[in-house]
Amino acid sequence: MPLFGSTKETRVDYSRLPRHIAIIMDGNGRWAKSRGLPRTAGHAVGAETFRTIATYCREIGIEYLTVYAFSTENWKRPMEEVSAIMGLLKKYLLEAIADMEKEKVRFVFFGDLSPLPAELRELAEETQRRSAGYEGCQVNICLNYGGRDEILRAAKALAAECVEGKRSPDTMTEEDISNHLWSAGVPDPDLVIRPSGEVRLSNFLLWQSAYAEFYVTDVSWPDFSKEDLRKALAAYQGRSRRFGGV
Ligand code: IPE
Ligand code: IPE
Ligand code: MG
């Protein structure tokens, strides 16, 4: 069993990695504020962290990485901050498109893109379309995403199919719900990471995280490094996942 890493805390067995890692990219604003910078400066550094961590996940062979970029509740923020986040997402997607051939990352967006600025929405759709055939890591970007919104949409779609006579409520299964979520076809996350000290899900992957291992750290997202990811992986590998069994 190959074991790498400088200390026990970061010793990772690369033959037993989680298939799917999900990250709540939190703490950008506080990171910036503590340095006397505007919150948007934190978002810019956070976008760089995302690049580093996504590349690292691809390199070590993680199959699925899901990141929370903008929630259905984040529209409550001041307009200037929302616009800055949308601008950064646009910049990132333009860079991702340029790197696509080399990286072979498949991008998928979870969330209703229709309220986004048209240019960003089109870029997101183009990125998803152009990368659909790539067989490297799949990166799911949660954008205008909310776990409750996602479940509500699934419930509405299933109810409509019942009304149309295409299915019956009696025979509905958990799998039917899974298949109507943005994440249809993606295995549930094994590990959910939240940097920046908050210990809550904030409406992230509510259905899918039923048996995910949760890892929280006080390190803020702009400071989150490959070493921090290795710590999360080492902690994950030390857990005993029982799924309700013994
Ligand atoms: C996460 O960082 C990024 C988004 C929610 C878009 P925050 O902006 O929530 O940063 P904090 O939590 O206020 O520090
Ligand atoms: C969750 O973080 C959303 C993203 C990281 C995109 P928030 O900062 O919005 O969550 P709360 O408000 O602390 O719960
Ligand atoms: Mg936050």
Image (cartoon, rainbow, N blue to C red):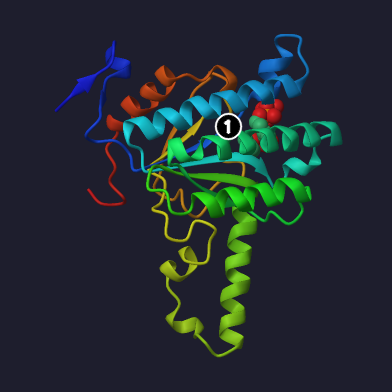
* Residue at the (24%, 19%) spot, across then down: 4
Q: Residue furthest right?
A: 79
Q: Residue furthest bottom?
A: 165
Please provide percent x and percent y for residue 69.
62, 38
Please provide percent x and percent y for residue 93.
62, 39
User: Does 133 appear above or below 120?
Assistant: below
Q: Which residue is mark 1?
A: 25
Please provide percent x and percent y for residue 202.
61, 41
Q: Depth check: 155 or 41 in front?
A: 41
Classify 10 Å Cα crowding around label 1: few (below 14), some (14-19), many (20 and above).
many
Is 162 displayed left or right of 188 in the figure? right
Q: How many marks?
A: 1
* Residue at the (67%, 41%) spot, across then down: 70
Q: Quadrant of the N terminus?
A: top left
Is 140 displayed left or right of 211 in the figure? right
> Does residue 129 show up?
yes
Please provide percent x and percent y for residue 151.
58, 61
Which amino acid type is shown beneath numbered disc 1?
Answer: Met
* Residue at the (58%, 52%) spot, across then down: 110
* Residue at the (31%, 51%) spot, across then down: 244
Element marked by disc 1: loop
Query: Is the CB atom of the residue marked by disc 1 within 8 angstroms of ligand 2's nearest atom?
Result: yes
Q: Depth check: 103 or 151 in front?
A: 103
> Does residue 216 show up?
no
Quadrant in the picture for residue 78: top right
Is 229 displayed left or right of 150 in the figure? left
User: Does 50 appear above or below 175?
Assistant: above
